[in-house]
């Protein structure tokens, strides 16, 4: 029996995988350049010939990558003008890649734009997570609650292993969201996961000090959910997020706060908190 057709199929699969890998590399490079501001909204992308030379890929791969970026709302092609970077307000801000490209660098103070986007991510958490915790307490299944408890146990077991603690912390919050039982939360769960990953990476840097403070706050959330007390679960989550905001504030003054103080307006996140 000849194996030639199988060999041809395997070769096609290898070429397809290679093309996808090259496309993803182009998407990652251009997407991060756009979101980080190295390529500004309202300007044109470099000419196709320059992009082909930069990435050393085929025209097909480049065009597939640009299609992905267009689907994320980052660019649009206009006849006789070229490919333009769209205004920031038109980007798909809940796209996991766009959120991931917004990640802050590991330094002591944040660039203004990155700090603003991190503030917005934390505000999204303030809007969604206390309500999700209340729903988890009200209608989470036994399996849901067990999953939250397992994540908390993993946080306790992490001790000073910051990476393990971050992963368990993330699992805890995702488990709370899943336990809400709200089907409309599920499609955006991955986006929320990415937002929390960015937030945790920036605000959870001092392992020993943060774990000592964070564990009791998470334990209060877990206890309230297990007690089927929606109000207590929401309040406990809000207190935890207030602590997250406090740690973010240590990285530098929030540009949104500066504008709010000048306008005599209160801080949004603090206004939702139960304590300062």
Image: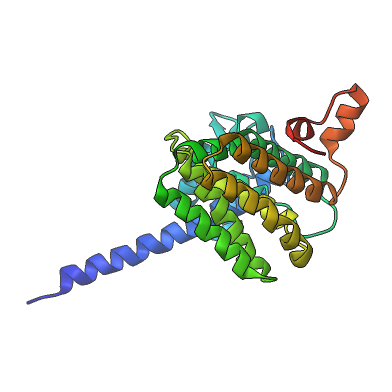
Look at the image and tell me whether residue 44 can be seen: no
**252 or 1, which lies in front?**
252
Locate residue 210 relative to residue 12 in the image: left or right.
right
Query: Farthest residue toward the right?
Result: 262
Look at the image and tell me whether residue 61 can be seen: yes
Q: Residue at x 50, y 60 (%)?
A: 150
Quarter-wise, where is residue 9 in the image?
bottom left
Locate residue 204 relative to residue 132 in the image: left or right.
right
Q: What is the x, y in percent for residue 198?
A: 66, 51
Instruction: Give the quarter of the figure containing the C terminus.
Output: top right
Q: What is the x, y in percent for residue 252?
A: 87, 48
Q: What is the x, y in percent for residue 33?
A: 67, 49
Q: What is the x, y in percent for residue 89?
A: 65, 29
Q: Residue at x 52, y 47 (%)?
A: 226
Quarter-wise, where is residue 41 in the image?
top right
Would you place residue 153 above or below residue 241 in this image? below
**79 or 148, which lies in front?**
148
**172 or 146, which lies in front?**
146
Would you place residue 28 above or below residue 78 in this image? below
Would you place residue 119 above or below residue 219 in this image? above
């Amino acid at each position: 029996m000849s194996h030639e057709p199988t060999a041809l199929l395997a070769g096609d699969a290898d070429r397809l995988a290679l093309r996808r890998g090259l496309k993803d590399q182009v998407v990652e490079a251009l997407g991060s350049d756009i979101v980080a501001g190295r390529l500004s909204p309202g300007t044109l992308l470099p000419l196709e010939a320059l992009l082909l030379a930069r990435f050393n890929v085929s025209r097909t791969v480049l065009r597939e990558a640009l299609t992905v970026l267009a689907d994320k709302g980052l660019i649009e092609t206009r006849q006789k003008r070229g490919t333009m970077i769209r205004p920031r307000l038109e980007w798909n801000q809940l796209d996991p890649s766009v959120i991931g490209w917004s990640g802050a660098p590991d330094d002591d103070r944040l660039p203004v734009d990155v700090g603003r986007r991190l503030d917005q991510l934390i505000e999204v958490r303030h809007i969604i997570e206390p309500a999700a915790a209340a729903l988890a307490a009200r209608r989470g299944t036994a399996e849901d609650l067990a999953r939250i408890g397992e994540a908390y146990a993993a946080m306790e077991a992490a001790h000073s292993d910051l990476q393990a603690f971050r992963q368990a912390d993330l699992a805890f919050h995702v488990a709370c969201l899943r336990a809400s039982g709200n089907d409309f939360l599920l499609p955006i769960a991955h986006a929320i996961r990415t937002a929390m990953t960015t937030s945790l990476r920036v605000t959870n840097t001092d392992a020993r000090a943060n774990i000592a403070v964070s564990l009791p706050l998470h334990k209060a959330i877990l206890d309230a959910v297990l007690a089927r007390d929606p109000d207590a679960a929401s309040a406990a989550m809000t207190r935890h997020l207030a602590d997250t905001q406090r740690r973010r504030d240590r990285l530098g003054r929030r540009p949104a706060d500066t504008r709010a103080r000048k306008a005599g307006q209160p801080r949004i996140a603090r206004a939702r908190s139960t304590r300062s």
